[in-house]
Image: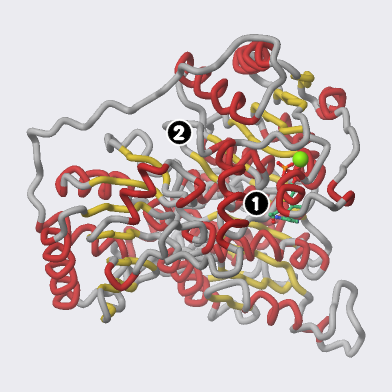
């Protein structure tokens, strides 16, 4: 876009920004009233040389790169930043109660909507509270932007130990280096536009978190425009050679299989990969972490690959393939640890993190989007093959007075989806995650690899804020005790998730690995009765009949979150978790290393 065009964009944003401000200031042509520092730099009627401040430039840059909101908790080092965010009205600012939830909500917003997720916190106590959520985003390839307030330069030079400081004033800066793919300290506002562009574009290109530290005397400083994103250059010759070799390998395979991994969602490639699968006429599975991918994209998915813990037919399809194409798959223990046979990755084709590995060689610097485009250019469309109808299985929910088991929860949610249409799932870690494997044909966001608890409820809020879709949250009692209380913010955020709480009064997943520990006993919490105090409706569910009725009632009730406190007996596991634990135990026996 020409400078003039960029200027016009900037101007229209400023007019939107200025309309939101109502206080004494300089009257602006064509739009509302400017405020404070911006007013002091607004052009005269002739020159129209508009200046925005650092915060406004940063927010426009975030919005241009897909962010639709900021989640945060302020502190004195971040108050000027929060004030400018709120005044600018460029992105809505949503506060939560504890920084882990801020991180999980911003992570979920990015996963569910695409583009950048944004978490704003104060220096020290706030940012360090965010560490686990940022680590999860790094491991799971989520482009999460951390905005942290910080001491001003003159405070840092005071010679005093500052509140919220750890070992040194740089401790936090060094900590976040380990959790992000790029970072910048916006100390020199003249360099800020280039720093912001570099860091935000790194987040998108690598689909990983980044860190911006903003000294508290900088947010309202005048700042030039942030350059727009530049797509990374790709070596065309290398891309062509890679695509040709990949297709040659697939065409020579008798049992080719495509496994879809999380990068396909992170880079917004589901439609393109679905079309490629149709054109290749190839079996398609997802990885454990990729569960929920390609839903609604007209692909006949064979299922999720879970090795010994999953559907034996799906496992055989993958493990016996002589042409396994891993697209965007994280080769991790949670995706492959319980394989009956160690998959020989040297015979697989693995496109991940910009590299494409085949046999004993690797093509570097080939983003997944460029590779998929190159493959589509070389594989003709098959207009004769209509996209298969999405398989929505609603049967199987039994309505009787038997006590609820995890598998009944999946069946009841499938029945609800068949009746009313699928709702997206936000899932925590515990048996709820393994149960979610049996919920068909719907989107799923969950930390399936990094596996941190506490994700479910904040993620459900982040998903609904960012997409407007009402989610079903699946969470265990242990994880709910960590961040479930964020439901108290649901009404203020305009959210009304349906929360299915697996209440077995236990860290049951740990008990299945080590039954002798009493430390897994959590006591009996009456979560249902706590819902009203947080602005929602709660009910206790014990039988399958009660479960179906409670889900119907919850689905019919809008504007208040719905909490189903489902009482589960100890030792009753989902079929997938039971198989997973059995496989892990079997494979960990001496001499049982998978072949
Ligand atoms: N702390 C955090 C933040 N994340 C974790 N994953 C753990 C600890 C370890 C852990 C599990 S599973 C689990 C813990 C404590 C118990 C989960 O209990 P609950 O939510 O009630 O679910 P369920 O009863 O279905 O197990 C993973 C293995 O690391
Ligand atoms: Mg539990």
* Residue 589: x %, y % from top left: 61, 64
Sequence order check, earlier mark of 2 and 1? 1
Residue nearest the observer in this picture, 122 or 507: 507
Using the rendered view, name the quadrant where residue 371 is placed.
Answer: bottom left
Q: Is residue 201 left or right of residue 322?
A: right
Q: Which mark is residue 2?
A: none
Q: Is residue 42 in view from this perspective?
A: no
Does any atom of ligand 1 lie closer than 8 Å to the CB of label 2?
no
Q: Is residue 201 above or below residue 268?
A: below
Position of the N terminus by quadrant: bottom left
* Residue 481: x %, y % from top left: 82, 43
Q: Quadrant of ligand 2?
A: top right
Residue sitting at x 74%, y 66%:
127
Q: Which mark is residue 104?
A: 1
Q: Is residue 515 left or right of residue 447?
A: right
Residue nearest the observer in this picture, 258 or 398: 398
Assess disc 2: are there few (<14), some (14-19) or many (≥20) residues with their C-alpha within 10 Å of its C-alpha. many
For the residues marked 2 and 1, what is the alpha-carbon distance in whole angstroms? 20 Å
* Residue identified by numbered label 2: 442
Position of the C terminus by quadrant: bottom left
Does any atom of ligand 1 lie closer than 8 Å to the CB of label 1?
no
Query: What color scheme is it?
Result: secondary structure
Q: Is residue 483 above or below residue 176?
A: above
Q: Is residue 127 left or right of residue 447?
A: right
Q: Is residue 441 above or below residue 187?
A: above
Residue sitting at x 78%, y 21%:
538
Using the rendered view, name the quadrant where residue 500 is placed.
Answer: top right
* Residue 562: x %, y % from top left: 70, 23
């Amino acid at each position: 876009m020409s400078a003039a065009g960029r200027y016009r964009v900037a101007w229209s944003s400023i007019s939107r920004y200025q309309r939101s401000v109502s206080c004494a200031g300089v009257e602006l042509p064509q739009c509302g009233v400017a405020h404070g520092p911006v007013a002091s730099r607004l052009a005269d009627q002739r020159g129209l040389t508009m200046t925005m401040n650092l915060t406004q430039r940063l927010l426009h840059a975030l919005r241009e790169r897909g962010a639709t909101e900021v989640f945060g908790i302020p502190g004195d080092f971040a108050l000027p930043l929060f004030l400018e965010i709120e005044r600018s009205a460029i992105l809505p600012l949503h506060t939560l109660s504890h920084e882990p939830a801020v991180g999980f909500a911003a992570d979920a917003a990015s996963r569910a909507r695409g583009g950048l997720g944004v978490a704003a916190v104060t220096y020290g106590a706030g940012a360090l509270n965010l560490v686990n959520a940022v680590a999860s985003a790094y491991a799971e390839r989520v482009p999460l932007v951390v905005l942290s307030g910080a001491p001003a330069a003159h405070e840092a030079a005071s010679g005093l130990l500052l509140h919220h400081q750890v070992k040194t004033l740089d401790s936090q800066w060094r900590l976040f280096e380990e959790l992000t793919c790029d970072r910048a300290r916006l100390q020199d506002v003249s360099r800020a536009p280039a720093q912001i562009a570099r860091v935000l574009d790194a987040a998108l290109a690598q689909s990983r978190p980044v860190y911006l530290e903003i000294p508290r005397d900088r947010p309202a400083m005048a700042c030039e425009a942030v350059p727009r994103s530049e797509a990374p250059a790709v070596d065309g010759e290398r891309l062509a050679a890679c695509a040709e070799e990949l297709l040659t390998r697939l065409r020579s395979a008798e049992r080719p299989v495509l496994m879809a991994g999380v990068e396909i969602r992170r880079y917004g490639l589901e439609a393109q990969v679905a079309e490629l699968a149709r054109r290749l006429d190839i079996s398609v599975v997802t990885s454990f972490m990729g569960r929920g991918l390609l839903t609604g994209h007209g692909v006949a998915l064979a299922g999720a690959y879970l090795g010994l813990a999953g559907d034996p037919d799906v496992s055989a399809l993958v493990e016996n393939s002589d042409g396994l194409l891993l697209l965007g798959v994280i080769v991790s223990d949670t995706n492959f640890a319980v394989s009956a046979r160690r998959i020989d990755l040297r015979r697989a084709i693995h496109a991940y993190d910009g590299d494409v590995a085949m046999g004993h060689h690797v093509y570097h610097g080939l983003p997944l989007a460029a590779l998929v485009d190159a493959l589509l250019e070389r594989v003709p469309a098959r207009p004769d093959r209509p996209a298969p109808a999405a398989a929505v299985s609603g049967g199987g929910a039994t309505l009787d007075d038997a006590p609820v088991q995890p598998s009944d929860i999946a069946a009841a949610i499938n029945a609800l989806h068949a009746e009313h249409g699928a709702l997206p799932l936000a899932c925590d870690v515990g048996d709820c995650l393994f149960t979610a494997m049996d919920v068909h044909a719907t989107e799923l966001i969950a930390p399936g690899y990094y596996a941190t608890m506490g994700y479910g409820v904040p993620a459900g809020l982040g998903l609904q804020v960012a997409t407007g879709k009402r989610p079903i949250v699946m969470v265990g009692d242990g994880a709910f005790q960590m961040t479930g209380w964020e439901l108290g913010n649901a009404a203020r955020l305009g959210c009304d998730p349906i929360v299915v709480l697996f209440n077995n009064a236990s860290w049951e997943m740990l008990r299945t690995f080590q039954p002798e520990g009493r430390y897994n006993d959590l006591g009996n919490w009456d979560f249902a009765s706590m819902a009203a105090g947080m602005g929602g409706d709660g009910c206790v569910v014990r039988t399958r009949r009660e479960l179906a009725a409670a889900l119907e009632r919850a689905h019919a009730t809008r504007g208040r979150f719905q909490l189903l406190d489902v009482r589960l007996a100890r030792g009753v596991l989902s079929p997938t978790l039971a198989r997973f634990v059995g496989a892990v135990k079997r494979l960990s026996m001496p001499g049982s290393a998978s072949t």
